[in-house]
Amino acid sequence: MKEEIIIAGFGGQGVLSMGKILAYSGIMQDQEVSWMPSYGPEMRGGTANVTVILSDERISSPAINAFDTAVILNQQSLDKFENNVKPGGVLIYDPNGITRHPKRTDITIYRIAAAEEAARLKNAKTFNMIVLGAYLKVRPIVKMENVIAGLKKSLPERHHHMIPMNEEAITCGMNAVVEVK
Amino acid sequence: MDVKDIIKPENLVYGKSDVILDNVMHYCPGCTHGTIHKVIAEVIEEMGIQDKTIGISPVGCSVLAYNYLDIDWQQAAHGRAPALATATKRLMPEKYVFTYQGDGDLASIGTAEIMHACNRGENIVVFFVNNAIYGMTGGQMAPTTLIGMKTATTPYGRNVELNGHPLKITELIAQLPGTCYVTRQSAEAAGPVRKLKKAVRKAFENSAQKKGTSFIEIVGTCNSGWKMSPVKSNEWMKENMFPMYPLGDMKDE
Amino acid sequence: MGELRLMKGNEVIAEAAIRAGVDGYFGYPITPQSEVLETLMARMPWEETGMVVLQAESEVAAINMVYGGASCGKKVMTSSSSPGMSLKMEGITYLAGAELPCLVVNVVRGGPGLGTIQPAQSDYFQSVKGGGHGDYKLIVLAPNSVQEMNDFVGLGFDLAFKYLNPAMILTDGMIGQMMEKVELADFTPRWTEEEIIAKSGTWATTGKTKNRERNISTSLELDSAKQEIFNHKLQAKYKTIEENEVRYEKFMCDDAEYLFVAYGSSSRICQKSVELAREKGIKVGLLRPITLFPFPSKQINEMADQVKGILSVEMSAGQMIEDVKLAVNCRIPVEHFGRYGGIITSPEEIVEALEQKIIGG
């Protein structure tokens, strides 16, 4: 098993931490993982992205141009990464603020209205966990118990009381994701 | 009377400190460094801290200070002695650490290092020898060179418009909260040497008591660079250097 | 098995330092390596192991603090990124000249000048060929994973103390900023003063006791005849290092007709390029220098008997290629490829370059 993922959106959407939780979940099930962020001033309010690789084998390059799955959370990222999804791959996006929707026909496209769901849950901080839920529904590469274990590892202990809330958000995302046909 | 008849213990009027080595000094006759070295050596010996003292020598005439005092030494890059001293003292807090720096080393190229070490209040002792000239490289202008003073790079005299003002760095250092003791001394005669020795002792004691940085400026001469006899140099220093760099304690907490 | 964590390369440097019994870290913030100092400050190792951590007023001060600490026989280190490393070069040549052990980490970013904060490998010359003045060498280790960032802290100090020479970890913003699974080393206690005196008592400035001569750490020798003798001694040491400490890794080289030579992050990307090229039927392998000084010249030269051409891949305008060419003595074609100025080379571009410059060339 090898899954090469890009998660891309605005700084502040929790893109990097979503990637980190995913990577930690991989470690929990004895996989090799890499987490390669964009870094620098762009993180401060601009675009942010992270490449996460989970694999049963040793990972070669952590920096790649072709992805099995792209998780896209704003227009700039959609414009930038739509063409980098491997044929037959997956693109998951939040339609919030998107005016030019994905056009590829050789990949499977899913929508997750995560911003809307987060507003409904009255908790903007759950946004990235809703997206993670959508991803896990589409690509169940890590077991839920390992995601929770990953969450525990990546959150500081003082935030562990928020794990049930995050779990709920993941479930919400799993239920809300829809395939675009 | 033969020399052998004179050299007898009962005739001893002056003894060299054991901390001073027998190596022939490279300093010019009349230079103040030798006297300052002697004073530091005597204090180290009297305090019994030879095995706990680490000196940091600079770049400049006193780069070879390690040849004269029988203690462990580090020889620093130009201006960086306070950085070496910072790490040495922090890594070995029970030791005594001092830097020995000239005016070019401390007040020009090493301004950042001395300011920050003093501002952090490192428990070190700084000896700052100010003779208003670069001695080792052949008598060029120092930051402390007086207005109108001729040097190899101010052949017509230091000119404010061209060269800026003499830097009274010790006055600046005294403003820093990390320093506990800031004083300006000299060593041209027995009286000033005795005062200097008291200051050196106090500085090392401050270090033991973790009071912060002790900073001693010693106004000295460079008769070779100044192109004067040693006697004339001392006279010139008193007439010209002391008004600009007045002696005394600026801070003693 | 040690503790498993998901960590950034930069964070691992900090954690590994604490666990390796390092006595002092002296640094100054610069992107993309500030996490080293930040992690240490957050970890407060002075409470745990007694390790000193200090934010210096400049990179110049930081490397000179390293000089002071190293002079005491302590395990001391600093880290920075390219523009900061240029400032440290004065201190580094003094450390080499005074034969002092220490560890310096360069998390390279694109240059010249202030350049970019994105990853690059354009400090190879500076690290391997000098950087500072005088005939000196650093022992240069090039990790290509977060695990090796961890492992090379300990290795760097081992080599530095074995040869009384500064060691450098030459990495870049890619390895420094990325997270991978890492198995952390167990804690090694810091050396006591007695251990330091037993190990380094002939030179460490721990305070002159009655039973020995004074120790002086200096790189000054005004007598040229003596300075030349000292330089002969340094060169002999570097030769010993070349004989004993070459480290490298081969990837799919057994049947290779072509070869990539790449270190650090480029070697990771090249592994992917090897996989992509082999899917196309191109038999290419990868030789990765792990030590850049000493350089695996002999091993590359041996590969020249087997392969038809070498592509030297580096995120620079072409620096390591000079050593690759010297290694094979121009017996087979050697070309350079790599993006630079902060752009990470893609695995696909490397395969294209191999096809155009070596196979088609």
Image (cartoon, coloured by chain):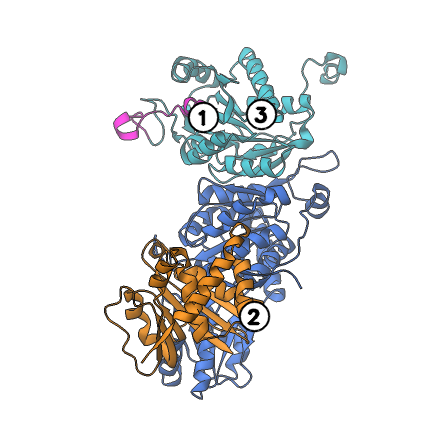
Chain colours: A orange, B cyan, C blue
Q: Amino acid at mark 3?
A: His
Residue numbers of the magenta segment: B154-175
Which residue does the numbered mark 1 point to in the structure image? B176
C-alpha gap between disc 1 and disc 3: 27 Å
Residue C121 magenta-drawn?
A: no
Q: Is residue B132 above or below residue C81?
A: above
- Pointers 1 and 3 in contact (C-beta within 8 Å): no
Q: Quadrant of the N terminus of chain B?
A: top right
Which residue does the numbered mark 3 point to in the structure image? B37
| Position in image of residue C105 (x %, y %) | 51, 54
The verdict on a common chain for dots 2 and 3 is no
C23 left or right of C284 in image: right
Residue visible at 64% across and 58% down in the picture: C185
Which residue does the numbered mark 2 point to in the structure image? C248
Q: Amino acid at mark 1?
A: Leu
C-alpha gap between disc 2 and disc 3: 52 Å
| Position in image of residue C251 (x %, y %) | 54, 77
Q: Is residue B133 above or below residue A98?
A: above
Number of other residues with Cα within 10 Å of mark 1, as a class: few under 14, some 14 to 19, many 20 or more:
some
C-alpha gap between disc 1 and disc 2: 52 Å
| Position in image of residue C156 (x %, y %) | 59, 57
B225 left or right of C149 in image: left
At mark 1, the secondary structure is loop
Q: Chain of mark 1?
A: B
At mark 2, the secondary structure is strand
